[in-house]
Image: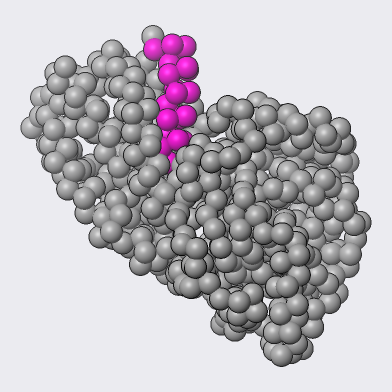
């Protein structure tokens, strides 16, 4: 393992200390770990907070700033943050208008954010947890923890962050975030494993001629392995998984002000005529030039399916340490979502 | 014979040793079907418990258990943090003021803890999680508690049941947690959470046996 680290147990702490020095516009707290906009709490504004394991940079800490997140809670590498981090962060950013937690559907994240929401609510903070579960690789919701939350998280943080900046209420932000999730779908491919610093060796072994299809963002193996194919073939496969996926119904838990309530949501399959934001993401180790090769084919597949790409995002935004590979996210957009996608944002990892 | 506070503190210290020793093994189990951090997280969590323990070891058992739960909740992360955190906290809430645990008290602690796992994680039997170990182990403890006069008898009754339950997680297909995303590929691997839970029961038996 070759990595730029000092002591394995200090990896996240030292990275945060460096981030604080590099970005005086952010406030970085070390005990417990969380990052906020330095001008928090912004009077009258709903606070948008997200978080997850470290190793997915620039998400989420890199998306803290005007127009996106008010706060982010980084966990250990690939490990969900803990409720005390989220609770302290929520207290620091709440202006009284409430806090929206954007939560990726991974069991640990869900449970820790639920515990945090209970803590915040008991302190009189208005909270809501909205789940992102967009990964079509995980098809059978009956026998998994549901779809994973991956690339759509980035788009949700941009769109809902702008809506909060524009004065949306907590309920309006929650509705919009739920809509983004229902309209967004992703699929990921790994060409290599990554190495979690504390483990010190690759999470899985992948032969020179093999790829993992249907991966998440934690170096976990995907749904299946296959011989590597051309960029066009892999792109077409991933795009078709997304575009041809049928409607998906799931039960999510949202906070009703006093307790958790189950809510059933169904997303809409893509159809000819849809306008989409196309997001081609690097898992960390794949250069942007290769992503453009993927984008080229993605554009062709979208056109063939009757989808119009009206905006795009190409680059490393939700990574998996140094893993080589890519993910594709397509998000059906309407005018409301497009307006907030185009709104200004000023963060270390995303500027508009 | 009741379980006294010194035995509880010894149990926690020994568990810390066990998680330090099994860190790589648990992480390897997790790498097969998850994201390779379970051993690292448990080791970090119990390390923090050891730092906190001196501040509460002269308090009642309920306070000690609650402190363990809070510490695990705020230091383990992942799914294990809230699950183990809730396990110890729920047990602690029942045992306020206690200086020692009768077999009945002990079973109540485990029952409340397992109830906490159910409440937080909503697992079902056969999902390939720590609950697959705790559910039968708790039943065995309850069965024994009626006629047991010593806590060790309760724990010893549960141990072989837990051992079998742990092996029984191997052929299961995961339906909860990160392993569930592997679908059929999760079959054939022992569940890391059930394994770390098994160490709790096994270590307590060793402590109570002296």
Query: Given the current orientation, which residue lies at the most extreme top position?
Result: B58
Q: Residue furthest front?
A: A208
Taking depth in this image into account, of A132 and B58 the one nearest to the observer is A132
- Check if residue B56 falls in the magenta segment: yes
Magenta stretch: helix, strand or loop mostly: helix
Q: How many marks?
A: 0
Q: Is residue A319 above or below residue A22?
A: below
Spot occupied by residue B34 in the image (x, y as percentages of width and height): 44, 52
Instruction: From the top left corner, tell me how far across and down residue A168 is, in percent.
Output: 84, 57
* Point 85% across, 57% down: residue: A162
**Taking B104 as reference, is A53 left or right?**
right
> In this rendering, is residue A153 above or below B104?
below
Q: Is residue B18 above or below residue A131?
A: above
Quick check: is A86 in the magenta stretch? no
- Read off the magenta span: B38-57
User: Does A236 sit left or right of B129 as displayed?
Assistant: right
Identify the residue shown where x is 70% and y is 89%.
Answer: A305
Is any part of residue B185 visible from this angle?
Answer: yes
Q: Please state which of residues B10 and B87 is positioned toward the viewer in this rendering.
A: B10
Residue A106 in view in this figure: no
Q: Indicate the position of residue B99 as horizontal and vertical percent values.
A: 30, 14
* Residue situated furthest left in the rendering: B147
Give the position of the C terminus of chain A as an image quadrant: bottom right
Viewer-closest of A47 and A345: A345
Left or right placement of residue A149 versus residue A23 in this view:
left
Residue B125: quadrant of the picture: bottom left
Residue at the (37%, 44%) spot, across then down: B28
């Amino acid at each position: 393992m070759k990595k730029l680290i000092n002591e394995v147990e200090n990896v996240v702490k030292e990275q945060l200390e460096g981030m604080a020095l590099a970005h005086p516009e952010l406030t970085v707290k070390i005990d417990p770990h969380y990052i906020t906009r330095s001008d928090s709490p912004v009077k009258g504004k709903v606070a948008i907070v997200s978080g997850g394991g470290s190793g997915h940079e620039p998400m989420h800490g890199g998306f803290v700033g005007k127009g996106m997140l008010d706060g982010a809670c980084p966990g250990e590498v690939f490990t969900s943050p803990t409720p005390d981090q989220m609770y302290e962060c929520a207290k620091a950013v709440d202006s009284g208008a409430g806090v929206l937690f954007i939560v990726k559907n991974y069991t640990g994240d869900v449970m820790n954010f639920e515990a945090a929401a209970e803590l915040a609510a008991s302190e009189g903070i208005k909270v809501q947890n909205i789940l992102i579960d967009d990964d079509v690789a995980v098809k059978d919701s009956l026998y998994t923890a549901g779809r994973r939350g991956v690339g759509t998280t980035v788009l949700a943080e941009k769109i809902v962050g702008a809506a909060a900046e524009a004065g949306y209420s907590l309920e309006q932000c929650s509705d919009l975030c739920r809509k983004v999730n229902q309209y967004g779908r992703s699929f990921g491919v790994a060409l290599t494993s990554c190495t979690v610093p504390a483990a010190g060796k690759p999470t899985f072994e992948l032969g020179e001629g093999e790829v993992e299809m249907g991966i998440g963002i934690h170096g976990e193996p995907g749904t299946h392995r296959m011989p590597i194919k051309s960029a066009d073939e892999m792109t077409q496969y991933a795009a078709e998984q997304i575009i041809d996926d049928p409607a998906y119904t799931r039960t999510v838990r949202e906070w009703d002000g006093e307790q958790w309530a189950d809510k059933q949501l169904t997303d809409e399959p893509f159809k000819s005529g849809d306008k989409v934001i196309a997001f081609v993401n690097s898992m960390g180790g794949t250069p942007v030039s290769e992503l453009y090769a993927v984008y080229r084919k993605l554009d062709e597949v979208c056109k063939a399916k009757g989808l119009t790409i009206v905006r795009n995002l190409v680059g490393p935004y939700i990574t998996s340490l140094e893993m080589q590979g890519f993910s594709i996210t397509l998000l059906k957009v309407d005018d409301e979502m497009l307006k907030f996608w185009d709104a200004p944002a000023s963060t270390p990892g995303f500027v508009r | 014979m009741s379980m006294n506070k010194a035995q509880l503190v010894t149990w926690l210290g020994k568990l810390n040793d066990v998680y330090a020793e099994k860190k790589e093994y648990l992480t390897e189990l997790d790498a097969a079907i998850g994201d390779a951090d379970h051993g690292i997280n448990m080791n970090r969590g119990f390390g923090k418990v050891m730092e906190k323990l001196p501040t509460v070891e002269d308090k009642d058992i309920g306070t000690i258990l609650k402190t363990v739960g809070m510490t695990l909740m705020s230091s383990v992360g992942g799914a294990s943090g809230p699950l183990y955190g809730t396990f110890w906290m729920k047990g602690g809430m029942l045992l306020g003021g206690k200086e020692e645990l009768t077999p009945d008290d002990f079973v109540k602690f485990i029952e409340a803890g397992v109830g906490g796992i159910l409440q937080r994680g909503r697992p079902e039997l056969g999902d390939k999680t720590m609950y697959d170990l705790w559910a039968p182990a708790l039943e065995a403890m309850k069965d024994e508690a009626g006629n047991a006069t010593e806590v060790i008898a309760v724990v010893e009754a549960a141990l072989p049941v837990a051992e079998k339950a742990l092996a029984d997680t191997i052929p299961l297909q995961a339906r909860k947690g990160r392993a569930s995303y592997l679908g059929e590929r999760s079959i054939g691997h022992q569940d890391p959470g059930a394994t770390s839970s098994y160490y709790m029961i096994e270590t307590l038996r060793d402590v109570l046996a002296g």
